[in-house]
Amino acid sequence: MGFLAYADGVKLEVLKYPDPRLRKKGLSVKEVTDEHRTLVTNMIETMYDENGIGLAAPQVGESLRLLVIDTRPTDDDGKPTTQGLTDLEKQVKQPIAIFNPEIVVQKEATTYEEGCLSVPGFFETVERANYVEVKGLDENGKEILIKTDGLLAICLQHEMDHLEGKLFIDRLSFVKSNKIKNKIKKTGYPDAEEVAEERQKVRELRAERAKSVSAAKKAEAEKAGKK
Ligand code: NI
């Protein structure tokens, strides 16, 4: 399907917390139509334009069970690469558009510093399943099953929360969640520059963490090799 190779749609407005439309549950899509496919193209365009890795239809004011995702990192020219993706992630063709997503299997737990285009400039650690199998319909209305771990698994769960009217800040402790919500209500969102700075900080933190995890794994493997 050529139209998903890269998006050349229209950039949509991304709603921000506390917009009440983010709290509505998305409706199931009975049949995937051309109108839906146009929405998919526009959502992918919007996601790329905002430097996001996922976007759910309720975030652009459409109360539908639809999400788009592309977790691939980009190289210096802005081209997507598979660097750092897990073996399972590499097997999934991205960008993904999935209607009526449903988790059929989930295993183990992991944490990640999550952010959201609807809560720009805020990042917090959230716990999710480490491995998921998600079924749904693709942009042609064909049934698909995605089996993945890594960032893609986390992102799928984050976006599926949006379809229930739920945001990642709802998953934090009561104190942390209220602190963020009150700050937004009182002083609004940081400007674009600050959001970019915060995003960079989180990226570095994640890279450091990935390094220490792989170093620990290497040490473990060496230890096992010596036995
Ligand atoms: Ni989000």
Image (cartoon, rainbow, N blue to C red):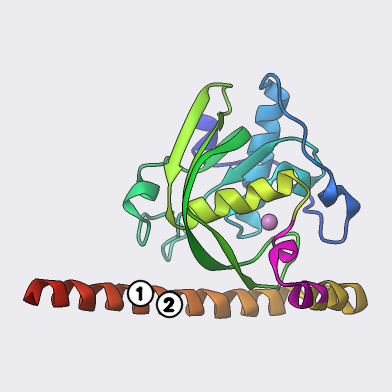
Q: Amino acid at mark 2?
A: Arg
Q: Quadrant of ligand 1?
A: bottom right
| Farthest-out residue, left | 226
Residue 220 place in picture, x, y as percent: 22, 75
Number of marks drawn: 2
Which image quarter: residue 65?
top right
Q: Which mark is residue 209?
A: 2
Q: Amino acid at mark 1?
A: Val
Q: Secondary structure at mark 2?
A: helix
Q: Is residue 207 left or right of residue 194?
A: left
Q: Is 68 covered by the magenta stretch? A: no
**In this rendering, is residue 30 above or below 7?**
above
Label 2–label 1 contact, CB within 8 A: yes
Q: Is residue 176 magenta?
A: yes
**The residue positioned farthest toward the front in the image shown:** 227
Judged by its main secondary structure, the magenta piece is helix
Can residue 11 be seen here? no
Q: Nearer the viewer, residue 212 or 97?
A: 212
- Crowding at dot 1, Cα within 10 Å, few <14 / some 14-19 / many 20+, comes out as few
Q: Which mark is residue 149?
A: none
Q: Which mark is residue 213?
A: 1
Residue shown at 41%/62% (left/top)? 75
Which region of the structure is painted magenta? Answer: 167-178
Quarter holding the C terminus is bottom left
Left/right placement of residue 93 relative to residue 112 reads: left
> Position of 80 compared to 113: left or right?
left
**CA separation, marks 2 and 1?**
6 Å
